Image: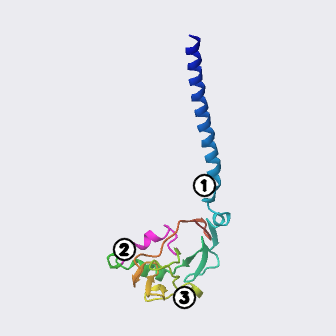
Amino acid sequence: MADTMHAGDGQTRRDFIYLAGAAMGGVGAAAALWPFIHSLNPAADTLALATIEVDLAPIQPGQAIKAMWRGKPVFIRNRTQEEIDAARAVPTAELIDPQPDQARVKEGKDNWLVLVGVCTHLGCIPLGTSSGESKGDFGGWFCPCHGSHYDTSGRIRKGPAPLNLHVPEYAFLTDTRVKIG
């Protein structure tokens, strides 16, 4: 009977040693993988650019500026009432990427248009923000690389671009300050 107990204790000890060894191996593997997993996190300089705040006070009606956000240009335009009316007069059925103007601006802030300034065709940067000048056939932006024309709402109207200029996530902090991102 003493031999049977001893054999049972040995089996129990062996199981414990296997489990303890496996647990230690798992902890060691996790410790070895942690630097690799941590390297997949965004860099500090990227996180710093996750959001930007822009002062809108100096932008006069009809003018546009270009700000940088996440390494991309962002066009911010203070539209005139004529530009808003022109954008809203276009039937959405005529648009390549149908989207009403009201869906591209914040309610009550119709004059402020915020767009990622990257052409949706091949990633070029359209013209139309320097000195507040409009470019293209529709009073908005023009991509000279392949001839895409965007209107005063940033919607594609003519050319090879398949989609409208992207509207980033943004919020008005005050009447003269916007946070993008």
Q: Does residue 174 appear to the left or right of 166 in the view shown? A: right
Task: Residue type at mark 3: give it.
Answer: Glu
Badge 2 is on which residue?
A: 98
Residue sitting at the far front: 3
Mark 1 sits on what residue? 37
The nearer-to-camera label among 1 and 2 is: 1
Q: Residue 165, relative to residue 134: is it above or below?
A: above
Q: Examine the rendering and report whether any part of residue 103 can be seen.
A: yes
What is the distance, in whole Å, between disc 3 and disc 1 at their CAs? 47 Å
Three-letter code for the amino acid on which mark 2 is drawn? Pro
Residue found at x 53% / y 65%: 169
Q: Position of residue 131 (x, y in %)?
A: 59, 87
Picture quarter with the N terminus: top right
Where residue 95 sits: x, y (%)? 36, 78
The residue at 63%/59% (across/down) is 39
Question: Mark 3 — residue?
Answer: 133
Q: Of marks 3 and 2, which one's residue comes earlier in the chain?
A: 2
Predominant secondary structure, magenta span = loop
Q: Secondary structure at mark 2?
A: loop
Q: Secondary structure at mark 1?
A: helix
Magenta-drawn segment: 96-114
Would residue 83 appear left or right of 92 to someone viewing this image? right
Q: Position of residue 58 (x, y in %)?
A: 64, 79
For the residue carrying disc 3, how many other residues have a C-alpha within 10 Å: few (<14), some (14-19), or many (20+)? some
Residue 161 location, x and y as percent? 42, 80
How far, Cα to Cα, is label 1 from label 2? 42 Å
Check the image and report above or below for 77 versus 29: below
Q: Earlier in the sequence, mark 3 or mark 1?
A: 1
